[in-house]
Image (tube, rainbow, N blue to C red):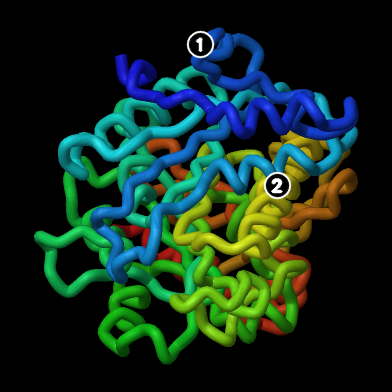
Amino acid sequence: MAFDFLVPVSDRVLAHCELLPAQALGKHIYMHTARHGLPVLANVSVAILGVNESRNAFEKKPERLDISEIRLQLYNLMMGNWNSSIIDLGDIEEGETVEDTYFVVKEIVAGLLEENIIPIVIGATQDITYPTYRAFDGLKNMVNLVSIDSRFDFGMDEDLISSHSYMSKIITEKPNNLFNFSNIGYQSYFNSQEELDLMERLFFDSYRLGELISNITLAEPVLRNAHVVSLDARAIRAADMGYSRNFSPNGFNGREICAISRYAGISDNVSVFGIYECENSNQAFQLVAQIIWYFIEGLNFRIQESPNSNSNDFTKYTVPTEDESLVFYKSHLSERWWVEVPSILTSHTKTNSPALLPCTELDYLDACNQNIPERWFKAYKKGFN
């Protein structure tokens, strides 16, 4: 049983939680302890899971990630008005090989998904995204992956998997369950033209850092359709992460990354949320803790919505264009928007693919001006492949 490989939460964290006020998050989380073992999974909404595997780091890590410090900062925070039941499963330590670690991560995440529990994975390196994606094998036919990252992480060597190349393995390895990949916050000078061309050829979505900073709400519809969200902490600017050496002067600030995290939590579909590549600094620990807090906050504001023309909860808008009539829906409750993609509705051969693409009001207004949204066009073209 993969859960047998979990290491309990450290005594230092448990002792700290004893001193916290009753309203603190640490007083409301059921933890894996050496004395009492694993918490019960029944009726649990969220599971926190640490992964101390860094052997496939692209840049050698200066020191081991102190996940306990992230816990200390997280458990200091106050509970929101939440209904979620949260557990902390402890950590997965390095296996004999990296593949052993991947296997344990995959099995544990798959087990949590089967129980409808959302894992929040705190990993030393972003290649841990790979086994969390593989955890959907046998559970879901097609998976949408969103990476919040300054790089696309396509490697040049197919045989190599690292924190800068794990996406190549996800794209090429069978079974290929990846329906769509979206990048949020890429920075052009970190990505080769070949990688940009590959994103276009595969009809994947990408949003430059500057585009999102000018309008952070653009991230919401992208995350609304995601099943796996992978956050590379190096997408956050160095000043907000304690000036760690592997971080860039440019990136999201603390407010922006917390807003993105909340959008991920609100998404009806996000089933795995991973935070990777953090380095040891008090400022970084605090920000990662707040990112996790905002994800859980968003989770507690989820609204299960299924737009259709027969529901009084939605308004349907039909926009004639030169080639297509685009059908939009707006929710009266959340004010979110969707657009139908005809190719997915009628001729797509991949099961469980979305017939409705999340979008923004700006996409609707662009369509009214005869400008077809780029995301709609990519989804439409992908439907024939």
The answer to whether 99 appears left or right of 336 in the picture is left
Quadrant including the N terminus: top left
> Alpha-carbon neighbours of circle 1 within 10 Å: few (<14), some, or many (≥20)?
some
The part of the image, by quadrant, that contains residue 202 is: bottom left
Judge whether residue 359 can be spotted in this image: no
The residue that mark 1 highlights is 37
The part of the image, by quadrant, that contains residue 364 is: bottom right
The part of the image, by quadrant, that contains residue 137 is: top left
Q: Which residue shows up at 33% across the image and 59% down it?
A: 384
Residue 96, percent across and down?
17, 36
Q: Which residue shows up at 84% across the image and 48% down it?
A: 334
Q: Which residue shows up at 60% across the image and 55% down it?
A: 223
Q: Residue furthest left?
A: 159
**Total marks drawn?**
2
248 or 383, which is in the foreground? 248
Element on which disc 1 rests: loop
The answer to whether 35 appears left or right of 23 in the picture is left
Residue 124, percent across and down?
41, 53
Q: Amino acid at mark 1?
A: Gly
Quadrant including the C terminus: bottom left
The residue that mark 2 highlights is 73
26 or 187, which is in the foreground? 26
* C-alpha distance separating marks 1 and 2: 23 Å
Dots 1, 2 in contact, CB < 8 A: no
Element on which disc 2 rests: helix
Residue 311, percent across and down?
81, 36
